[in-house]
Image (cartoon, grey):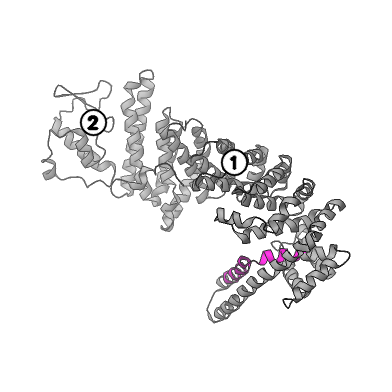
Amino acid sequence: MNVPAAPVGKNKRKLPPTPDDAYLKKVRTDEDDDDFRAGWGPGTVGSSSGNGGGREVDGQVRDDDEDERFHESGLSDEQKKIWEIVDAGEEVPATIDLPTLKKMVLKFEKVINRNQELRVKYSDTPLKFIESEADLDEEIKNMLTASDAPELYPNLVELGTHVTILSLLSHENTDISIAAVELLNELTDEELVTEASESAEEGMKILVKALVESDALDLLVQNISRLHEDQGEDKQGVFNTMSVIENLISIDPSIAEVVVEKTTFLSWLLQRVRVKTFDSNRQYASEMLAILLQNSRPNRIKLGELGGVDTLLRVIAAYKRKDPKDPDEVELMENIFDVLCAALIEPEIKEKFLEGEGLELMILLLKEKKMSRMRALKVLDHAMLGSDGASCCNHFVDILGLKTLFPAFMRKGMKKYKKEYKSFSEAEEDEHVVSIISSLFKNVTEPTSRARLMVKFEEADYEKIDRLVEMHKTYAGRVADADKEIEDRKKELEEEDLSDDEREAEQEELFLKRLTAGLFTLQLVDFIMASVCIEDKEGQIRDRITLLLEKDGQTLDSIKTILKEYAENVGDGKGDNRENAERDRILGLVEAL
């Protein structure tokens, strides 16, 4: 992902320790300000920041009328420079402890208050408070070092620093709000506690909770609407805002629903991905949509209410006749497809997908055979899955979708496609295609439509039946190979001293190994074969399948065995009505065979 430059906190400056008296005596009084800052960090002489508010005029230091920090200080130029060196060394300490943190926070608060005082006092004269604004920007950057000690975050919360930082999101100067977002992004970076102590992890959780309770989400989203992405810093600010929200969700996944319920963030994301120009922020917005919808029904429903299905279809339609220009845009396109698939879990979204002519668009993508074709099959699979996919299944047959689906089943024209798109996966394609066909057999009940489905297996001298048996043999062989490896592993496990949890985890891994080998595809293929056998009144299809299986030393009993296992593994084991109906349907096929 090409993203804006990393936050400065990722490469913090490590200032040298405060110099001793002997070294300070060597300071050259004629050293210019820039060289001084380069050597010692964020000094303040002649700059808009820090404690050096005086100006040098005709060789003399003149105090600012509005800033009384050096009034009657009695310090010479050299003495001031020495003290500023000391201040610079204190501003960003090499290590953070509680006293140091409190000192940083106190200075941070003072600079904020000073800026607000001057803004109120000289609201019509920006030049009067511009230096304090620069001071504030610098102090925000100095606060980045607090991220070195997440175990001290509870102290930050006790001091109310999180509220102070959040107040800066509403600062009149968006440069300040952008700097505050950068600070929040650094403080909440999940990587800070990936391999840290328990106290650091707990500190991060406390900070995140405090931020959310202090309306951080709403303030972040309100601020993002003030930024103009045609400006470099604002564009970075938008990126960092999304990053902060992702950080918060990473620490506490429940925040994904809170941000959708309490703010307009989801609406903003949909508008952002709809912008036609590709950039890193559009890509990140698509990723954030996927994160928000991944595990949340309320968020998926909200997407539908906001017209999100139409937005997603419009973005996808742009890739009907053209491919993404580079890998980053490929990721954007795939994110949008993933978001749509996640949303299609919900029956309400399937209705909106149907109304928005989503099926028609996916069929067009299949015909065009661009990169988007691979994802279109996945979307069709999700849209037609389950009993709530019945409307999509029936409409798919009505709009002649079978005419486009079965060439994919037969892999017609795929040699050229595989050469052009190296990411193409035959196994993934097989799984989606047979899943769609099995959904059609489960959901299409109208006699005419059902007959049209059966005709596809009878035409062209039963070539689809031959393909089914071929797939059965291929995937049965792969699963058998996996089973041999699994048996060897089980023997090893018998000799290992494992806890119950470890043994259960190993069993799950072994089952996943079978799925990876193609067990689910094999189960669907056999479900389709059993279905066409039962539907075929004349028995010709059954005879052909039996003959082809016998050539390989198999019988219909092998299909029955696979289907029985399929029935056992339907659903999550909770046994709701839909699961029971699905299980009965599969076992009914076994009986009928």
Residue under the image location 40 percent in, 46 percent down: 155
Q: In the picture provided, is 357 more to the left or to the right than 24? A: right
**Residue placed most toward the observer, 212 or 580:** 580
Residue 41 x/y as whole percent: 25, 41
The answer to if 548 sits in the magenta stretch is: no
165 or 502, which is in the foreground?
502
- In the picture, measured across the screen, residue 386 lies left or right of residue 194, that is right
Nearer the camera: disc 2 or disc 1: 1
Numbered tag placed on residue 260 in the rendering:
1
The residue lying toward the viewer, choosing from 277 and 122, is: 277
State the extent of the magenta-drawn residues as a range.
Answer: 505-528
Residue on which the image places disc 2: 52
Residue 261: percent from left, percent from top:
61, 40
Amino acid type, residue under disc 2 in the picture: Gly
Rendering coords of residue 417 (x, y %): 60, 54
Q: Earlier in the sequence, mark 2 or mark 1?
A: 2
Which residue sits at x=73%, y=78%? 553
Could you tell me how far apart the alpha carbons at marks 2 and 1 are, in whole angstroms?
46 Å
Query: Considering the numbered disc 1 on the image, is that residue within a helix, a strand or a loop?
Result: helix
Reply above or below: 319 against 385: above
Q: Identify the element where label 2 is drawn.
A: loop
The answer to whether residue 524 is magenta is yes
- Residue 214 seen: no
Residue 513 visible, this orientation: yes
Label 1: few (<14), some (14–19) or many (≥20) C-alpha neighbours in 10 Å: some
Residue found at the far top of this picture:
124
In the rendered view, tell whether residue 222 sits above or below residue 476. above
Q: In the image, is residue 561 above or below residue 254? A: below
Instruction: Residue 210 in the image: state x and y as whole percent.
Output: 48, 44
> What's the magenta bit mostly, secondary-structure-wise?
helix
Q: Quadrant location of residue 196? A: bottom left
Identified by mark 1, the residue type is Val
